[in-house]
Amino acid sequence: MGMTIAEKILARQSGCDVVRPGDLVVAKIETCILLDTHFNRHAGWRWPKKLHDPDAVALIADHIVMAANPDSAIALKTMRRAARYYGIKRVDDAGMNQGISHQVIADKAYALPGTILVNADSHTLSAGAFNCVARGLGRPELLQVICTGETWYQCAPTVRYELTGELPEGVTAKDAFLYLAARWGSHDNLNLEFGGPAQAGLSLNARRTLSTMCAELSAEFALWEPDDLLLNHVKARTQRPFFPTWPDADAQYVDVRTINLSEMVPYVSGIDTVIHNAVPLQDFHEKIRLDQCVVGSCANGTIDDLTAVAQTLKGRQVAPWVRFFVTPGSQAIYREAAKLGLLATIAEAGALITPAACGACAAQDFGALAPGEVCLTATTRNYKGRMGNSDARIHIASPATVAASAVTGYITHPRDLPATA
């Protein structure tokens, strides 16, 4: 009986011949990401005298990178001092290489096929798009990792998603995720594995959107099969060894489900959750006036997403009562979008382009909602209070849908926008 991708990677990294669901393993960690928030003086950490392997650690400033208060400034100063003290070379601070941690991981190939990556942030599943076992850990577990180079896992069962067809024009991976969440709901204590003939037609950005959003399903890991697109991306960015890992032909799954991407349409979520709570946009008939729109985050701050926003906004204006925040996922994406003229188009339409940070997704430095306000977002989460106020309402949709809705001021299907001159 063969193994799934997750089982094979856990077996390799723990020195086991076979790993099955329910097995406990102690596995070697290839990369440990520490964020700026780890260095907050209120975090309660006692830092070790030395690290197991400073080259296995990367420091990324993404939650409080703009230092909105003295505590944040102290945390960032402490992070820089820690980098010097421990000899950590991979430091992505404010400047050329900074960005949301999961986007920086993608930009710089920190996630290596066939290995394990850890990070405190719950959307670490994003790195599963790179054939890498990845998930968020708590601070005590991360302290163990930087001291020993290892941590433990209990292997979860896996659900396999076979992707067929091709996304229609104007339909995105975000829509496919909302469909998946609405139909199958929670994947608590389950791994997801993606593959199938449609994978070749999906960009790495689209795959990352799906993997990242699987955190909202309470999944353990969300892994993709390796292919030439992925392997060429990694080879161009790192000399570190990696191990492309495919599932065995006789791998055992809890379920194998098929998603025909050709049948996908734009979706929009209800409020407070995405679990069994999204509908095709064409069936959403409630006229909801919006106060805020957001595109960005680790799930949808890619060049693909900014292109969709710019194409939708070109020749149009954001409704005067709507605040529209657009956040590139990293400085690298910001520079590319600037060269392509995307940022100029977005700004001329009346949207506000923000620094590459978590920002409005959790109202970290900006984007908090007032009581009773409504937001349509292409970020990651919409639980009650996510953007700072439990009396606000948050719906989730694709970047194109959010941009179209920012123009009309109401939740709007992009096809329903009037033509531009």
Image (cartoon, rainbow, N blue to C red):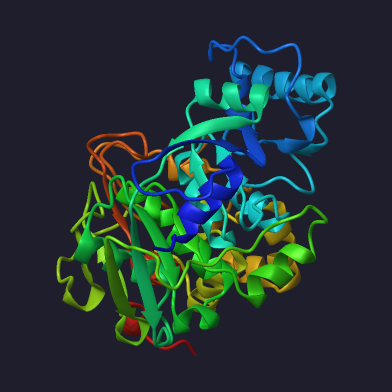
Residue beneath the point at 52% across and 77% down: 202
Q: Along the horizontal axis of the image, is 201 left or right of 266?
A: right
Q: Position of residue 219 (x, y in %)?
A: 35, 49
Q: Relative to 374, does residue 149 appear above or below in the rendering?
A: above
Q: In the figure, residue 79 lies in which quadrant? A: top right
Q: Relative to 360, does residue 317 appear above or below in the rendering?
A: below
Q: Position of residue 155 (x, y in %)?
A: 40, 44
**Residue 334 appears in the rendering:** no
Q: Relative to 23, does residue 408 appear above or below in the rendering?
A: below
Residue beneath the point at 80% across and 66% down: 236
Q: Along the horizontal axis of the image, is 119 left or right of 95?
A: left
Q: Relative to 400, does residue 234 appear above or below in the rendering?
A: above
Q: Position of residue 332 (x, y in %)?
A: 73, 57
Along the viewing direction, whichever of 133 and 403 lies nearer the viewer: 133
Along the viewing direction, whichever of 183 and 253 lies nearer the viewer: 253
How many numbered badges does the structure rendering display? 0
Residue beneath the point at 22% across and 54% down: 275
Residue beneath the point at 58% across and 22% down: 144
The quadrant the N terminus occupies is bottom left
**Residue 336 appears in the rendering:** yes
Q: Position of residue 268 (x, y in %)?
A: 27, 65
